[in-house]
Image (cartoon, rainbow, N blue to C red):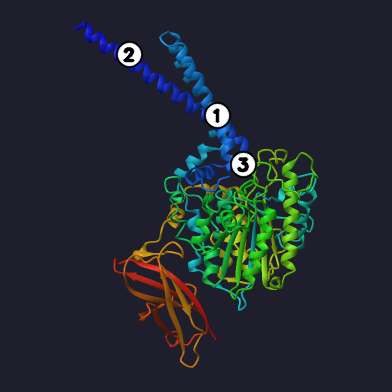
């Protein structure tokens, strides 16, 4: 009996040792990786915020720079592997001795100490305490000040202007010299500085300094910046509600710049030299504006770059500007007005990509050389645009996406200096109604871009943004930079609701390429019969049998005069309907039409749209 008990005790003892060994190895590996990950994170990202960290922790890794991933493995995971190997060697050498337990204890305790210390450092640097507190405190700021484009009258000019929107990676006003409002002794971006001074950056009567927009919470990384400038709100949603990693939706409850231009009949393209999937950029532009995507994958698949060619995040800006010229010319030849949006990448942290045409002006300061190179290339690209026939009817917007996250480029910039992103509006048809220098954020880019294209916006506000050409104060001018930044960082149930899929009345708002779709063709207005003839054909992605196809027709922005027109099926499978303008009092102007598919499962899909002008 006693022998049996001793056997059980010995077995339990061995089991505890085994469990302790495994636990010790796990803790040592995890805490070593944690410590080096935190050190690497702050060495790599200079201006990292909790909002950005949360977003990228919940977003897919598709399209990430492979060099960054390799660097992380080398710097963070390799030391953990070395520690584990050392511990396994020690365990093997001291097996059966008392030193085995010492190795077990020290092997776990030392990495745990450094890991916890690193975590405390990260908690402090990221101001995680205030972030957690802000996420627990619900703010009605966005709900109170948000101006919904759905409820705003937006009127395009009779001749719609083209738009070329250039997002410049990490481009700041900061890089200009101090006499021009920058923070450097030398002007790193002389060409961009000249462009801002010669055009509109809302610096008012100050002819010496250039001006830019504040990048507030929710807009301090590329996807957040793109979203904020084109939707007028921050990309702040809690980690529990962030469904970006599902690649299904992207704020389906909002109307963005892309949506507005799509409804106005624009052809739209988005071009980048990296993978568009990264950070949800492809998803965003497809969901909001049905953009054609031209990214690294497209260039490789289309033979624009050699198979397997990859530098930096994909391909360099020198190629990007060349491809952009070709695409813009193709769009300019079309009958529709166009919106061409692009994002540069060479100036991404850390230190940027030094291409063959970059100068050696700043010696070993590679990032300064890359910034100077970007400034020259953008100016050259702008000169090309201005030499084209379409330029007369084209507005160009150049804007930095966010302040740089390079770890040391701005380390000598005084903390009191207000860092702003570069901003310039070129060939705008709007005239500013204020002469003083404006204080604004990148939220204001949304309505200001439309205004620069000659679009009239009732109230001069969209999202949290204000039309800078108007005399209305921006929210930043009314509230103050710090207070606005603090408010948009807080948890917002209203913002979370905007991020959800709109399923009201069982209606699924599905854009082209993601669900059932149809080619909707509207004829020119038949003046003598007072009718518009509409055909729906080329049905795609239809899973269930079609019960009916209905046409929604309206003429005013808020759809208050919306009428439904039934469509009947022809022998060839297409559907046909007639819009009688008598029902609208023969009202002249743009008639907007959307085709809705009702299937036998009881679901309704928005499948296509068209517009026709009634003279």
Could you say where residue 467 lies in the image, as x and y percent from the top left? Answer: 61, 64
Query: Which element is circle 1 on?
Result: helix
Mark 1 and mark 2 in contact (Cβ < 8 Å)?
Answer: no
Mark 2: few, some, or many residues within 10 Å (few <14, many ≥20)?
Answer: few
How far apart are the two marked residues, 3 and 2, measured between alpha carbons? Answer: 50 Å
Query: Which element is circle 3 on?
Result: loop
Q: Is residue 109 above or below residue 470?
A: above
Q: Nearer the viewer, residue 295 or 474?
A: 295
Dot 1 or dot 3, earlier in sequence: 3
Please tell me whether mark 1 or mark 3 is closer to you in this view: 1
Q: Nearer the viewer, residue 105 or 449?
A: 105
Please tell me whether mark 3 or mark 2 is closer to you in this view: 2
**Residue 470 visible in the picture:** no
Could you say where residue 336 lies in the image, as x and y percent from the top left? Answer: 58, 74
How far apart are the two marked residues, 1 and 3, measured between alpha carbons? Answer: 26 Å
Query: In the drawing, what numbered circle is on residue 425?
Result: none
Dot 3 or dot 2, earlier in sequence: 2
Q: Quadrant of residue 300?
A: bottom right
**Residue 136 visible in the picture:** yes
Query: Which element is circle 2 on?
Result: helix
Disc 3: which residue = 47
Image point (18%, 7%), residue name: 1
Could you say where residue 381 lies in the image, as x and y percent from the top left? Answer: 72, 61
How far apart are the two marked residues, 2 and 1, measured between alpha carbons? Answer: 33 Å
Query: In the drawing, what numbered circle is on residue 13?
Result: 2
Q: Is residue 280 left or right of residue 517?
A: right
Query: In the drawing, what numbered circle is on residue 78?
Result: 1
């Amino acid at each position: 009996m006693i022998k049996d008990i001793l056997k059980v005790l010995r077995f339990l003892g061995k089991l505890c040792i085994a469990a302790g060994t495994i636990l010790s190895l796990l803790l040592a590996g995890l805490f070593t990786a944690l410590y080096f990950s935190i050190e690497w994170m702050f060495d790599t990202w200079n201006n990292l915020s909790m909002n950005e960290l949360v977003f990228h922790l919940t977003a897919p890794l598709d399209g990430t720079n492979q060099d960054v991933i390799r660097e992380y493995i080398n710097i963070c995971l390799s030391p953990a592997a070395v520690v584990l190997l050392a511990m396994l060697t020690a365990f093997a050498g001291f097996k059966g001795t008392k030193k085995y337990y010492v190795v077990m204890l020290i092997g776990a305790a030392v990495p745990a100490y450094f890991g916890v210390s690193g975590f405390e450092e990260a908690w402090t640097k990221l101001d995680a305490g205030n972030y957690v507190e802000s996420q627990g405190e619900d703010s009605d700021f966005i709900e109170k000040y948000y101006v919904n484009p759905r409820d705003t009258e937006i009127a395009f000019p009779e001749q719609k202007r083209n738009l070329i929107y250039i997002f410049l990676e990490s481009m700041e006003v900061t890089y200009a010299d101090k006499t021009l409002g920058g923070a450097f002794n030398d002007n790193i971006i002389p060409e961009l500085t000249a462009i801002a001074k010669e055009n509109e950056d809302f610096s008012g009567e100050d002819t010496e300094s250039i001006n830019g927009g504040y990048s507030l919470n929710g807009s301090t990384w590329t996807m957040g910046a793109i979203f904020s400038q084109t939707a007028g709100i921050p990309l702040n949603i809690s980690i529990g509600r962030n469904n970006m990693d599902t690649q299904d939706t992207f704020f389906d409850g909002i109307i963005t710049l892309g949506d507005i231009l799509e409804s106005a009949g624009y052809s739209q393209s988005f071009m980048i030299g990296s993978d568009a999937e990264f950070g949800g950029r492809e998803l965003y532009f497809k969901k909001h504006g049905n953009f054609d995507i031209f990214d690294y994958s497209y260039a490789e698949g289309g033979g624009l770059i050699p198979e397997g060619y990859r530098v930096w995040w994909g391909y360099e800006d020198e190629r990007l500007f060349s491809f952009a010229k070709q695409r813009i010319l193709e769009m300019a030849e079309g009958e529709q007005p166009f919106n061409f949006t692009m994002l540069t990448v060479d100036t991404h942290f850390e230190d940027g990509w030094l291409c063959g045409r970059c100068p050696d002006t700043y010696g070993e300061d590679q990032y300064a050389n890359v910034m100077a190179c970007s400034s020259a290339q953008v100016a050259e690209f702008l000169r090309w645009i201005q030499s084209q026939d379409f330029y007369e009817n084209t507005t160009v917007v150049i804007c930095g996406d966010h302040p740089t996250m390079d770890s040391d480029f701005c380390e000598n910039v005084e903390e009191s200096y207000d860092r702003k992103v570069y901003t310039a509006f070129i060939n705008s048809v709007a005239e500013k109604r204020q002469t003083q220098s404006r204080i604004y954020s990148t939220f204001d880019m949304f309505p200001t871009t439309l205004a620069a294209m000659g679009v009239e916006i009732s109230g001069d506000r969209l999202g949290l943004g204000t039309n800078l050409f108007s005399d209305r104060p921006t929210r930043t001018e009314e509230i103050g930079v710090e207070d606005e930044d603090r408010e948009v960082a807080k948890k917002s149930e209203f913002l979370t609701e905007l991020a959800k899929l709109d399923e009201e009345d069982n209606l699924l708002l599905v854009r082209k390429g993601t669900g059932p779709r149809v080619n909707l063709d509207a004829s020119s207005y038949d003046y003598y019969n007072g009718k518009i003839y509409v055909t729906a054909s080329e049905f795609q992605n239809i899973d269930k049998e079609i019960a009916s196809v209905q046409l929604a027709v309206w003429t005013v922005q808020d759809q208050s005069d919306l009428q439904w027109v039934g469509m009947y099926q022809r022998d060839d499978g297409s559907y046909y309907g007639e819009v009688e303008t008598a029902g609208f009092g023969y009202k002249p102007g743009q008639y907007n039409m959307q085709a809705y598919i009702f299937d036998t499962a009881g679901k309704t899909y928005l499948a296509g749209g068209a517009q026709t002008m009634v003279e």
